[in-house]
Image: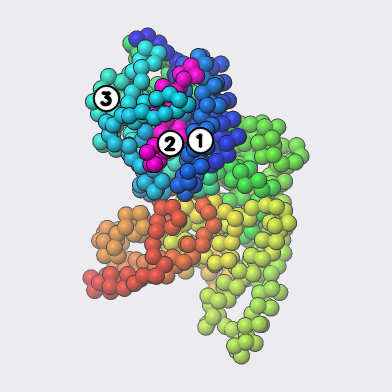
């Protein structure tokens, strides 16, 4: 059977941006030809973009994708290309890959297993193709095979699986039609999550062993449509061994990986394995900063604005913006970085660019400490961000006076604690929004997942923003990453941030407010969250899972009751959190991963049963 150079290209696509998407596809084909690739695999739904959401339910989007296919076919002389697109057949929509060779479409393979868990809702838009069924479809006056099929090309039998197809036990590759397949192509749109890349790599390796084949996998790249991040994985495995792996989370629009496969003797296949860290502590900075970069350029905004409190959450976001610039410059160079953002940025290196892209403001009250001001200023100066400082006591005082006059009484911390805290956070919002509007910039919201769990965030205060970059990660993880960023990534301006205990600083300093005192230790909150939210356990089930780790059983019950009670009454807040990046293996965004009723019993019976244990 001999040797054949095969490759994959990850693409940074945009839903329904035909010029961008077709342009990336054609550039990838051109690069592949120059590299001597004979078979090229492109990602799932590469023509439309994966994240078209309910626009897939229209007829014009799939039809336009099909209209665009000939533009791609015209550029396939001397190469075979697998490209993904939606396809209407007999009034049903299917997720397909078209296999093209020498300007001729040879087949349309249709996806059989539709992702319908976590952040995926594919059955809402697509129909699952019946296993083993093959038919034909009229395309440009030709009858082209469609369905569960293989093709003969370059002296090899080629089979297909599309993303979720490979993740199921009853996968298409295991059926008789694929018994003698030499090469499987898997165009994918597999979203990023901590730990997923290692699982995915093992899946590809095991697929090549199970199916006794060469298995080529190509993923999407970047923040395609707002929430999901794609890491641009390209993997090639043969007979149970990894043969090629690219560097993930690239800032390029196209990332190509190839290797020459020896189908007769896998030992002679030339390895092309790039180093790739799969530790969450490394992945977070890479994934979140790339997501910010794509969100900035695809929203056509002019930069970011951030209310910088001097604490962990805003400090983390400021550092991610700086990391966005650092990594972008490292991969694209200054001219490439500026060109891709399409902003009139002055040259001058990393700090100069951060200064033009990130504006921060410390908005203090009489309850703010000098330490948090120093922390905010120190961090902003160290990364080069613009830094403003102002006080909002006058605004808070005027709001308070108005309500006191209406109520006919003075407000006090003893009676009106939550209201007096919230007005400070909320009073910061109008002026920072104004600064963002004047700048034509995105306002960055600072809520994290732990706060979202229990509603420890002021609506229209620290939840205000165009985008919420860290809403899908826990506070404990953020604290760990900040230590890592200071010591391993060189962000020394985080020293003051990392030296302080997290506090909202909304009560008078004499009350010694801290986040963990208001809630519970973050480690305990995380442990309860994992069971209650990710694993959907009841209060009693959570208690049974954790009680061996707690000497004080009464305290554990208190924490569990507090978590479930606060979780229930704060669903309305989670409904209004700004769009956030999916980073962990679960999140609390009701528009993607976790739907919970706004109105519910509040676990009344379950918490009563917990007390009686």
Reading the image, the residue beneath label 3 is: 177
Reading the image, the residue beneath label 2 is: 87
**Height in image: 571 above or below 254?**
below
Distance (Cα) linking label 1 and label 2: 8 Å
Q: Residue furthest front?
A: 141
Q: Residue furthest top?
A: 2
Q: Nearer the viewer, mark 3 or mark 2?
A: 2
**Residue 272 position in % (x across, y down):** 46, 20
Please provide the residue range marked out in magenta. Answer: 84-108
**Residue 219 position in % (x across, y down):** 45, 33
**Height in image: 308 above or below 410?**
above
Main SS category, magenta section: strand
Q: Secondary structure at mark 3?
A: helix
Distance (Cα) linking label 1 and label 3: 28 Å
Looking at the rendering, which quadrant does residue 12 occupy? top right
Horizontally, residue 515 falls left or right of residue 596, namely right
Looking at the rendering, which quadrant does residue 400 occupy? bottom right
Nearer to the camera, 88 or 292:
88
**Residue 308 position in % (x across, y down):** 63, 57
**Height in image: 520 above or below 17?**
below
Horizontally, residue 517 falls left or right of residue 375, namely left
Q: Secondary structure at mark 1?
A: helix
Pointers 1 and 2 in contact (C-beta within 8 Å): yes
Reading the image, the residue beneath label 1 is: 65
| Residue 100: in magenta span | yes
Question: Which residue: 69% across, 47% down?
Answer: 302
**Residue 576 position in % (x across, y down):** 51, 62
Question: Which residue: 39% across, 37% down?
Answer: 89
């Amino acid at each position: 059977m001999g040797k054949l150079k095969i490759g994959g290209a990850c693409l940074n696509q945009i839903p329904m941006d035909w010029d961008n998407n077709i342009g990336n596809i054609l550039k990838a084909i051109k690069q592949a030809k120059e590299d001597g690739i004979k078979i090229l695999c492109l990602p799932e739904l590469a023509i439309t973009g994966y994240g078209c959401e309910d626009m897939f339910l229209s007829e014009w989007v799939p039809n336009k994708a099909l209209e665009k296919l000939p533009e791609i076919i015209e550029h396939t002389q001397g190469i075979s290309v697998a490209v993904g697109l939606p396809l209407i057949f007999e009034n049903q929509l299917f997720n397909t890959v078209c296999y093209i060779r020498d300007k001729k479409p040879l087949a349309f393979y249709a996806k059989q297993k539709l992702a319908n868990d976590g952040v995926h809702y594919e059955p809402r838009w697509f129909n699952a193709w019946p296993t083993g069924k093959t038919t034909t479809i009229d395309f440009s006056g030709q009858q082209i095979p469609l369905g569960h099929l293989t093709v003969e090309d370059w002296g090899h039998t080629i089979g297909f699986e599309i993303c979720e197809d490979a993740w199921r036990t009853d996968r298409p590759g295991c059926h008789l039609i694929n018994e003698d397949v030499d090469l499987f192509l898997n165009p994918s749109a597999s979203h990023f999550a901590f730990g997923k890349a290692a699982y995915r790599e093992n899946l590809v390796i095991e697929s090549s062993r199970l199916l006794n084949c060469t298995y080529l996998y190509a993923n999407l790249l970047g923040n395609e449509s707002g929430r999901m991040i794609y890491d641009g994985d390209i993997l090639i495995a043969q007979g149970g061994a990894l043969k090629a792996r690219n560097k993930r989370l690239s800032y390029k629009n196209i990332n190509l990986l190839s290797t020459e496969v020896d189908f007769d003797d896998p030992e002679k296949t030339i390895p092309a394995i790039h180093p790739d860290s799969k530790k969450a502590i490394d992945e977070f900075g890479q994934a979140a900063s790339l997501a910010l970069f794509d969100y900035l350029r695809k929203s056509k905004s002019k930069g970011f604005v951030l209310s910088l409190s001097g604490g962990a959450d805003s400090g983390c976001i400021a550092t991610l913006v700086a990391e966005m610039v650092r990594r972008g410059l490292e991969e694209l160079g200054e001219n490439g970085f500026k060109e891709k953002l399409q902003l009139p940025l002055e040259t001058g290196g990393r700090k100069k660019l951060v200064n033009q892209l990130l504006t921060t403001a410390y908005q203090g009250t009489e309850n703010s400490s000098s330490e948090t001001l120093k922390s905010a200023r120190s961090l902003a100066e160290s990364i080069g961000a613009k830094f403003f400082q102002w006080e909002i006591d006058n605004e808070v005082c005027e709001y308070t006076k108005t309500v006191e006059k209406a109520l006919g009484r003075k407000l006090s911390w003893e009676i009106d604690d939550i209201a007096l805290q919230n007005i400070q956070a909320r009073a910061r919002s109008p002026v920072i929004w104004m600064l963002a509007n004047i700048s034509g910039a995105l306002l960055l919201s600072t809520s994290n997942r732990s706060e979202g769990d229990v509603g420890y965030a002021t609506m229209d205060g620290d939840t205000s923003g165009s985008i919420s970059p860290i809403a899908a990660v826990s506070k404990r993880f953020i604290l760990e990453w900040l230590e890592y960023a200071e010591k391993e990534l060189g962000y020394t301006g985080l020293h003051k941030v990392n030296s302080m205990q997290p506090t909202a600083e909304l009560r008078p300093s004499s009350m010694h407010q801290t986040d963990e005192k208001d809630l519970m230790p973050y480690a305990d909150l995380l442990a309860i969250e994992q069971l209650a939210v990710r694993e959907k356990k009841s209060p009693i089930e959570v208690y049974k899972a954790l009680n061996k780790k707690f000497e004080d059983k009464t305290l554990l019950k208190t924490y569990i009751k507090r978590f479930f009670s606060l979780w229930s009454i704060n669903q309305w807040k989670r409904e209004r959190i700004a769009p956030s990046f999916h980073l962990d293996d679960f999140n609390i965004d009701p528009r993607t991963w976790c739907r919970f009723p706004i109105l519910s019993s509040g676990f009344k019976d379950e918490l009563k049963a917990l007390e009686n244990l």
